[in-house]
Image (tube, grey):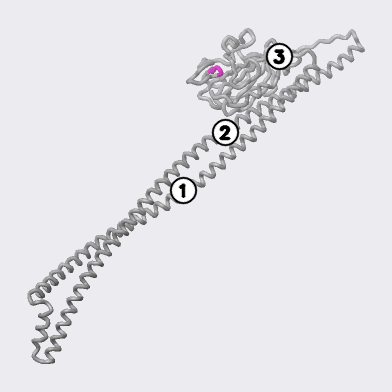
C-alpha cells in the first residue's frame, strides 16, 4: 500500500518516551525538563512543516497559473484553427468557381477558335485572290474600269470598304487571339494562386493542430504534476496533524508531570511534619475486548488470514502485514500496552491509529490502518489486546483488511521493521 510521503519522517524525531509517566525517568524534575525539550522540538518541527506547506501551496498555485496560461493558448489556437478551416472552405469553394469559369472559358475558346478558323479561311481566300489578280493592281483595274465619274466614285468607295473590312478582320482576329490568351493566362494564374493559398492554409492548419496537440499534452502534464503536488500537500497536512497530536500528548504529559511534582512536593512537606506517615497507591487497568491474549509483550492485532506479509510485493516494498477477515464488526486490538498519540483519517491509510509503546525501556510504535471505525482517541492509554477499532476498507484500500506496521523506536518514513518474531500474527 502507498505510504504517506516525503518528510513525515520529521515526526519521528520527536521523543514521546516519557508519556507513560515517570517509569522512563528518575525524577519528575528530569521528566519535566525532558518534556519541555521535546515540546520545543515538536514546535520547531511544526513550524518547519508549515513553512514547507506554504512553499508547496505556492508551487501548486504556480502550476495552476501555468495551466491557465496554457488553456488560454489552447483557446487562441482553437480560434486560429477554426478561422483557417473557414478560409480553407471558402478558398476551396473559390477553386470550384474558378474551375467552372475555366470550363466556361474553354467553351468560349472553342467558339473563338472556330471564329478564328473561319477568318483564317477568309483571309486565305483573300490572299489567293490577291495572288490570282495581282493584289492592289486588281483594285486599280476596278477603278479604271469606271464608265463615268459617278461610277468611279462608287467603285472607289467600294474598294475602300473592302480594304477596311479586310483590315477589321485582321484586327479582330488579333484581338480575339490576345483575348483568348489573356483570359486563359489570367484564369490559370488565379487558379494556381488559390490552390497555393489553400495548400498554405492546410499546412498552417496542420501546424496549428500540432501546436494544439502539444499544448494538450503540456496541460495534461501540468494537471498530473498538480495532482502529485496536491498529494504531497495532503501528506504535509497529515504530517502537521501528527506533529500536533504529538505536541498535545507532550503537553498532557507535561501537565501531568508538573501536577505530580507539585503533589510530591506537598507530600514531602507532609512527611517532614509527620515522619511516620505512610502511603499506598494503586492503579487501574483498562479492560480488554479481545479474546485470549498472547503471552509476551505483543499479541496479534486482529483475527483473520494473512493476505500479505512484510517484504517485496509486485516490485514494491510492502512495509507492513495485511490481515483480512470478512464480515462486520471485526475487532482490531492493541498489539501491546501503550498510548494513542495520533488517531485521524488519512487519504492513504483511511482511519488510522498510531500507538507508542515502552517495552522494558525500548520504544516501539505500531500503526493500524484502513479501520472502518476507531474506538479510542488521542491520549488514550490502552492495554495489550484491548479493542481499539473495527476492520474496514477506508483510504487507499482494496477490500476489508488491517494494514499493520511495527517500528522500533518512533515512527519514521519507510523505516518499519518486519514484525515476524516480535508480534505473534
Q: Splitting the image into 4 quarters, where does residue 14 fall?
A: top right
Distance in Å between CA atoms under marks 1 and 3: 72 Å
Distance in Å between CA atoms under marks 1 and 2: 28 Å
Q: Residues within 10 Å of mark 2 (few under 14, many from 20)?
A: some
SS class, disc 2: helix
* Viewer-side label of 1, 2: 1
The reply to whether residue 12 is in sight is yes
Q: Is residue 31 left or right of residue 289?
A: right
Q: Nearer the viewer, residue 282 or 370?
A: 370
* Viewer-side label of 1, 3: 1
Residue wearing tag 1: 77
* Viewer-side label of 2, 3: 2
| Label number found at residue 229 | 2
Residue at the image point whose x is 43% and y is 49% from the top:
81
Q: Return the x and y of residue 226 as percentages of the image width and height.
A: 55, 36
Residue at the image point whose x is 33% and y is 54% from the top:
195
Q: Main secondary structure of the magenta part?
A: strand
User: Range of the magenta residues?
Assistant: 319-323
Q: Residues within 10 Å of mark 1 (few under 14, many from 20)?
A: some
Tell me if residue 269 is in the magenta stretch.
Answer: no
Residue at the image point whose x is 60% and y is 29% from the top:
235
Sequence-first disc among 2 and 3: 2
Q: Are marks 1 and 3 in contact (CB under 8 Å)?
A: no
Q: Residues within 10 Å of mark 3 (few under 14, many from 20)?
A: few
SS class, disc 3: loop
Distance in Å between CA atoms under marks 2 and 3: 45 Å
| Label number found at residue 98 | none
Q: Quadrant of the C terminus?
A: top right
Residue at the image point whose x is 63% and y is 29% from the top:
238
Q: Return the x and y of residue 110 as percentages of the image width and height.
A: 19, 64
Q: Residue furthest left?
A: 132
Residue wearing tag 3: 285
Amino acid at each position: 500500500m502507498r505510504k504517506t510521503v516525503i518528510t513525515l519522517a520529521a515526526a519521528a524525531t520527536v521523543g514521546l518516551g516519557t508519556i507513560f509517566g515517570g517509569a522512563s525517568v528518575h525524577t519528575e524534575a528530569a521528566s519535566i525538563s525532558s518534556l519541555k525539550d521535546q515540546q520545543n522540538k515538536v514546535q520547531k518541527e511544526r513550524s518547519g512543516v508549515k513553512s514547507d506547506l506554504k512553499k508547496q501551496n505556492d508551487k501548486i498555485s504556480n502550476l495552476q497559473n501555468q495551466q491557465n496560461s496554457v488553456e488560454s493558448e489552447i483557446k487562441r489556437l482553437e480560434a486560429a484553427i477554426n478561422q483557417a478551416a473557414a478560409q480553407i472552405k471558402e478558398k476551396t469553394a473559390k477553386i470550384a468557381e474558378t474551375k467552372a469559369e475555366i470550363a466556361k472559358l474553354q467553351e468560349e475558346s472553342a467558339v473563338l477558335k472556330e471564329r478564328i478558323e473561319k477568318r483564317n479561311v477568309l483571309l486565305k481566300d483573300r490572299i489567293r485572290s490577291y495572288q490570282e489578280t495581282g493584289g492592289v493592281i486588281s483594285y486599280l483595274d476596278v477603278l479604271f474600269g469606271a464608265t463615268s465619274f459617278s461610277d468611279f466614285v462608287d467603285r472607289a468607295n467600294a474598294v475602300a470598304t473592302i480594304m477596311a473590312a479586310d483590315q477589321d478582320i485582321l484586327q479582330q482576329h488579333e484581338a480575339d487571339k490576345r483575348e483568348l490568351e489573356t483570359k486563359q493566362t489570367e484564369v490559370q494564374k488565379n487558379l494556381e494562386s488559390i490552390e497555393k493559398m489553400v495548400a498554405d492554409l492546410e499546412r498552417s492548419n496542420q501546424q496549428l493542430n500540432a501546436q494544439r496537440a502539444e499544448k494538450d499534452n503540456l496541460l495534461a502534464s501540468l494537471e498530473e504534476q498538480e495532482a502529485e503536488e496536491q498529494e504531497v500537500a495532503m501528506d504535509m497536512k497529515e504530517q502537521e496533524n501528527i506533529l500536533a497530536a504529538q505536541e498535545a500528548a507532550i503537553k498532557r504529559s507535561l501537565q501531568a508531570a508538573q501536577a505530580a511534582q507539585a503533589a510530591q512536593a506537598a507530600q514531602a512537606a507532609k512527611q517532614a511534619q509527620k515522619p511516620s506517615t505512610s502511603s499506598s497507591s494503586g492503579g487501574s487497568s483498562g479492560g480488554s475486548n479481545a479474546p485470549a491474549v498472547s503471552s509476551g509483550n505483543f499479541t496479534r492485532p486482529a483475527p483473520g488470514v494473512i493476505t500479505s506479509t512484510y517484504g517485496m510485493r509486485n516490485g514494491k516494498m510492502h512495509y507492513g502485514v495485511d490481515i483480512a477477515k470478512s464480515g462486520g464488526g471485526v475487532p482490531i486490538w492493541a498489539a501491546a500496552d501503550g498510548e494513542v498519540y495520533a488517531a485521524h483519517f488519512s487519504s492513504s491509510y483511511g482511519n488510522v491509529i498510531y500507538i507508542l509503546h515502552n517495552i522494558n525501556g525500548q520504544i516501539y510504535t505500531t500503526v493500524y490502518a484502513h479501520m472502518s471505525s476507531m474506538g479510542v482517541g488521542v491520549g488514550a492509554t490502552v492495554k495489550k489486546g484491548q479493542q481499539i477499532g473495527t476492520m474496514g476498507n477506508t483510504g487507499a484500500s482494496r477490500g476489508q483488511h488491517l494494514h499493520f506496521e511495527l517500528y522500533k523506536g518512533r515512527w519514521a518514513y519507510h523505516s518499519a521493521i518486519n514484525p515476524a518474531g516480535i508480534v505473534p500474527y
